[in-house]
Image (tube, rainbow, N blue to C red):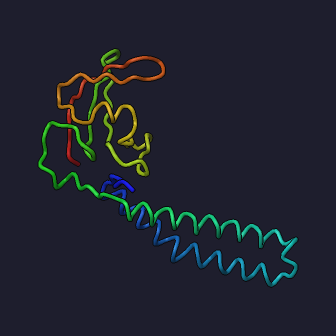
Amino acid sequence: MNRVPMTVEGAEALRSELDNLKKVERPTVVQAIAEAREHGDLKENAEYHAAREKQGFVEGRIQDIEAKLSHAQVIDVKSIEPSDKVIFGTTVTIIHLDNDTEVAYKIVGDDEADVKKQKISVNSPIARALIGKEVGDIVVVNTPSGAIEYEIEAVKHL
């Protein structure tokens, strides 16, 4: 399997979630199943079925996170010599050339992406267009509504 790029913060968030699932969620679900079993007939026991379903979700998420972490290529952008070039993990300030609006995005791994927090996936169309470009470059991003031009204002290693 290919290595999956991930920031230090993203890897830490996954490790924290994994720790919570193993130490808090898993024991809680096991206890809920045990309590539901004490209520008798399992075929018609809604609490039992709900607890088993949650157990399946928790175990699946644990496996998913462990797989992601085992294939993660954790990149600490702060340890890379700062330059004007857009790379994975950098925070890029771009200007929409049609309306002069300015926005900053951090380019992160797929699991870390959250547009509301100004974090975009390295595999998103805008990030793919930005990677490898430098401050001052004009970037054309193809969207369903047409091509949009941005100018790269700044690149920061945060």
Q: How many labels, in total?
A: 0
Q: Is residue 64 visible?
A: yes
Report the residue at 20% width, 33% height from top.
Answer: 154
Q: Is residue 19 above or below residue 130?
A: below
Name the residue at the bottom extreme: 38
Q: Position of residue 33 (x, y in %)?
A: 72, 78
Q: Nearer the viewer, residue 117 or 44?
A: 44
Q: Position of residue 100 (x, y in %)?
A: 31, 19
Report the residue at 23% width, 56% height from top.
Answer: 76
Q: Position of residue 157 (x, y in %)?
A: 20, 46
User: Which image quarter holds the N terminus?
Assistant: bottom left
The image quarter in which residue 87 lies: top left
Q: Is residue 18 above or below residue 6?
A: below
Q: Is residue 141 above or below residue 9?
A: above
Q: Is residue 118 visible?
A: no
Report the residue at 59% width, 67% height from top.
Answer: 58
Q: Position of residue 102 (x, y in %)?
A: 31, 27
Q: Nearer the viewer, residue 53 or 118?
A: 53
Report the residue at 57% width, 72% height from top.
Answer: 25
- Left or right, 154 with respect to 74, comes to left
Name the residue at the front extreme: 1
Q: Is residue 116 above or below residue 142?
A: below
